[in-house]
Amino acid sequence: MPKITGQSMASVAYDQIRADILGGRFLSEEKVKISDLVKELGFSLGAVREALSRLSSEGLVVAETNKGYRIAKITESELADLTQTRVMIESECLANAIRNGDLKWETNIVAAEFELSRLPLHDPANPERSNPAWNAAHKRFHEALVAACDSPWLLRLREMLFVQAERYRAATLPYERQSRDLEGEHRALAQATIARDAPAATQLLRDHLNKTRQILMDTVVGR
């Protein structure tokens, strides 16, 4: 078995803490207890601190003056700005992909949507949390939609915005089951994209992203 170095320990710690943040394990502005993470992950203090430093550079945690960390705050103004920007960038990526996509691209969308539809949104072991397998499949689905986009910079910007939006989406989890048909939204989006109907697909994408924003505005942000 390969030896785990300090650098690889920090990478594993980063991946795990990041997944927990995006999966909704931590609340907005919650204090990050480094000693608890060290014990839970089984890695060194230095590895966990390095992981948190990386997450701070992504805006997922905030470094405090006493060298501690806190989960980044969820705010109405940031959510509005984030959603508006994501709609612009992701819609352009999708329209670009529709112009350039081939049969393999279509096939990958179908497979990604089918996989996502077969997974429960909530973690079977903890219904109050998002299912990590669903989160991963959800990411793959949205990536599949835009995979044929021929602009690397548009795709990089889309990925950055997607990560930030996932933190907000996790906060809507208790309300999504009652208030929306996520499976239906994803299916309609996939079908319009494969049909090469760019106006319909981009409108469905805008509606999909704004639905999450509205749920969060109505139920969580500012409480």
Image (cartoon, grey):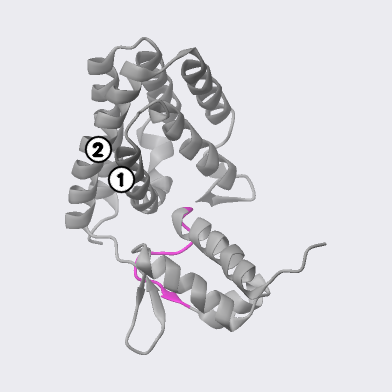
Q: Which residue is mark 2?
A: 89
Picture layout, residue 16 above or below residue 82: below
The N terminus - image quarter:
bottom right
Label 1, label 2: how many angstroms apart (C-alpha)?
7 Å
Which quadrant would residue 77 be assigned to in this image? bottom left
Which of the two residues, 219 or 114, is positioned nearer the viewer here? Answer: 114
In screen coordinates, is 121 left or right of 96?
Answer: right
Residue sitting at x 42%, y 66%: 55
Residue 29 colored in magenta in the image = yes
Which quadrant would residue 158 be assigned to in this image? top left
Picture layout, residue 65 above or below residue 117: below
Kind of residue at disc 2 = Ile
Q: How many marks are shown on the rendered structure?
A: 2
In screen coordinates, is 190 left or right of 118?
Answer: left
Report the magenta residues as a range.
Answer: 23-32
Q: Residues within 10 Å of mark 2 (few under 14, many from 20)?
A: some
Residue sitting at x 63%, y 80%: 44
Q: What numbered label is drawn on residue 45?
A: none
Kind of residue at disc 1 = Leu
Q: Which residue is mark 1?
A: 157
Residue sitting at x 50%, y 75%: 50
Say which element carries label 2: helix
Q: Residue furthest bottom?
A: 66
Residue sitting at x 45%, y 26%: 183
Say which element carries label 1: helix
Residue 191, position in %: x, y? 40, 14
